[in-house]
């Protein structure tokens, strides 16, 4: 990789734009132990918190023990006060309403810089102790070099131990696709990954950058995205290409674009999981943060989104269900299809209500039920021509 491409990816999670502001930010991140938060970080942490709340409730009430690895932990705090990701994880556990019923959570934190590791230790020292929360702050080290050791620590001798990996670096080089794949070796491993779509969009056509791109994506399928001209569409196409690479490995995946106001996403959070149940936690998170499409949050509206709960856009699901015309489908199939389209069961019921009102969906089993679309029901679908009034 040449110097040009290195300067390109150096701007990654910090590349808010160009000029003096960005330069100051780059220096702040390089020179200071602790830096100032920004609205994007707050939205990212909101996604973490919502996802972790659901993940903890499901995983820690099913398994005796699970692990979260924060592989790019940072110092655990921002100069303006908000907690860093590792502290967000610990607090989500300690403040969870069900936490007394939880199995044990191991939280392993890795950070490259010694000064940030020391600050992280100071931040953890302020938290209350819980025997169910086993915190392990690793000596300074780089993720790529430590991954296999961390994996052994995280699984604690049992490959089936659920492990959630948080991968949130500053640049493209630190987390190539091969490394992400390594984090998904165990059958219950999951990854929540920061995908630098802004930098991919800006640097993908720079000379000599294609090698970095292919290493990042684990192939050259990223090239399909370069045909998109508009920034927003191209960034979404990069996220979709990355997800395709995960699906090709038999994984389930969700994505969420983090943006400010009406600008296109600065980066995407990508979830990769072996189990479709993982998507059942992901969809509600994204819908909570973006009630219009469930695909991306605007940093300045993230707090007020519940106002829009009634204005759900469920077009993709509507189209998918209409395609079942002429068949009967079980609830489990429909619910699973909804999850893959990043929709919750409440959206499924909403679309079914709408189709039923047009005669296009009818519950055929059970005949009697207290609600229209109970779990376990069977639904028959019709095409609009089946419903058309022959006399007219
Ligand atoms: C984007 S920041 C992490 C922010 C943190 N996850 C949060 O949300 O509060 C990336 C951190 O990773 C550290 N870092 C950079 N390269 C690394 C590597 N290869 N291995 C481990 N840590 C690294 C940086 O020093 C920095 O503190």
Image (tube, grey):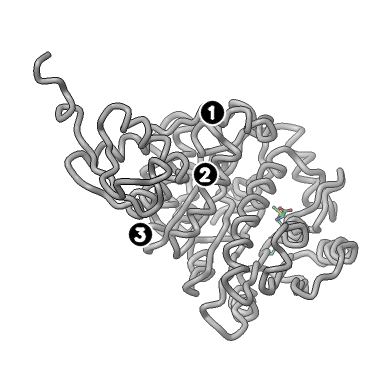
Which element is circle 1 on?
Answer: helix
Please report whichever mark, 1 or 3, sits nearer to the chain's N-terminal start.
3
Give the quadrant of the C terminus: top left
Which element is circle 3 on?
Answer: loop
**Residue lying farthest to the top in this orientation:** 392
Where is residue 253 drawn, in percent x and y?
A: 45, 54
Please report whichever mark, 1 or 2, sits nearer to the chain's N-terminal start.
2
Indicate whether 225 appears above or below 99.
Answer: above
- Asked if residue 330 can be seen in this view, the reply is yes
Identified at 60% across, 36% down, the residue is 297
Instruction: Please state if 87 lies on the left or on the right of 372 as rendered.
Output: right
Q: Nearer the viewer, mark 2 or mark 3?
A: 3
Q: Nearer the viewer, residue 371 or 357?
A: 371
Indicate whether 230 appears above or below 282.
Answer: above
Identified at 53% across, 42% down, the residue is 203
How busy is the neighbourhood of tag 1: few (under 14 within 10 Å), some, or many (20 plus)?
few
Identified at 43% across, 59% down, the residue is 276
Instruction: Please state if 346 lies on the left or on the right of 198 as rendered.
Output: left
Which element is circle 2 on?
Answer: helix
Between the C-alphas of marks 1 and 2, the distance is 35 Å
Where is residue 73 drawn, in percent x and y?
A: 72, 61
Q: Nearer the viewer, residue 326 or 13?
A: 326
- List the residue tagged with mark 2: 200
Please report whichever mark, 2 or 3, sits nearer to the chain's N-terminal start.
2
Badge number at residue 275? none
Q: Would you identify the image quadrant in which residue 91 lies?
A: bottom right
- List the residue tagged with mark 1: 310
Indicate whether 262 appears above or below 130.
Answer: above
- Asked if residue 231 can be seen in this view, the reply is no
Between the C-alphas of marks 2 and 3, the distance is 21 Å
- List the residue tagged with mark 3: 248
């Amino acid at each position: 990789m040449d110097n040009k491409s290195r300067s390109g990816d150096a701007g990654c999670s910090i590349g808010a734009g160009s000029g003096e502001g960005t330069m100051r930010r780059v220096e702040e991140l390089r020179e200071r132990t602790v830096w100032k938060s920004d609205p994007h970080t707050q939205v990212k942490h909101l996604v973490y918190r919502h996802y972790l709340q659901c993940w903890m409730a499901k995983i820690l009430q099913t398994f005796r023990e699970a692990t979260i690895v924060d592989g790019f932990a940072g110092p655990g705090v921002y100069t303006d006060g908000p907690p860093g990701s590792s502290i967000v994880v610990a607090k989500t556990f300690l403040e969870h309403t069900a936490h007394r019923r939880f199995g044990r959570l191991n939280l392993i934190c890795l950070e490259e810089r010694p000064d940030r590791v020391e600050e992280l230790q100071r931040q953890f020292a302020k938290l209350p102790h819980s025997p169910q929360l086993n915190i392990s702050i690793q000596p300074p080290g780089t993720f790529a070099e430590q991954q296999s050791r961390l994996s052994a620590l995280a699984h604690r001798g049992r490959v089936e131990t659920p492990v959630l990996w948080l991968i949130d670096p500053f640049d493209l080089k630190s987390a190539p696709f091969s490394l992400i794949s390594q984090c998904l070796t165990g059958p219950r491993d999951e990854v929540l990954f920061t995908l630098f779509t802004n930098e991919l969009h800006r640097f993908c056509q720079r000379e000599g950058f294609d090698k970095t791109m292919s290493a990042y994506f684990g192939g050259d399928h990223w090239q399909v995205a370069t045909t998109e001209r508009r920034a927003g569409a191209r960034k979404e196409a990069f996220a979709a290409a990355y997800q395709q690479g995960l699906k090709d490995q038999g994984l389930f995946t969700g994505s969420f674009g983090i943006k400010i106001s009406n600008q296109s996403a600065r980066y995407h959070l990508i979830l990769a999981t072996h189990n479709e149940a993982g998507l059942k936690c992901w969809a509600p998170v994204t819908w909570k943060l973006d009630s219009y499409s469930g695909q991306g949050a605007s940093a300045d509206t993230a707090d007020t989104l519940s106002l829009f709960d009634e204005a759900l856009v469920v077009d993709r699901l509507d189209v998918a269900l209409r395609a079942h015309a002429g068949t009967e489908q079980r609830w489990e199939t429909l619910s699973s299809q909804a999850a893959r389209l990043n929709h919750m069961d409440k959206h499924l019921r909403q679309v079914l209500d709408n189709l039923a009102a047009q005669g296009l969906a009818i519950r055929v089993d059970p005949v009697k039920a207290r609600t229209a679309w109970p779990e376990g029901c069977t639904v028959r679908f019709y095409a609009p021509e089946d419903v058309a009034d022959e006399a007219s």
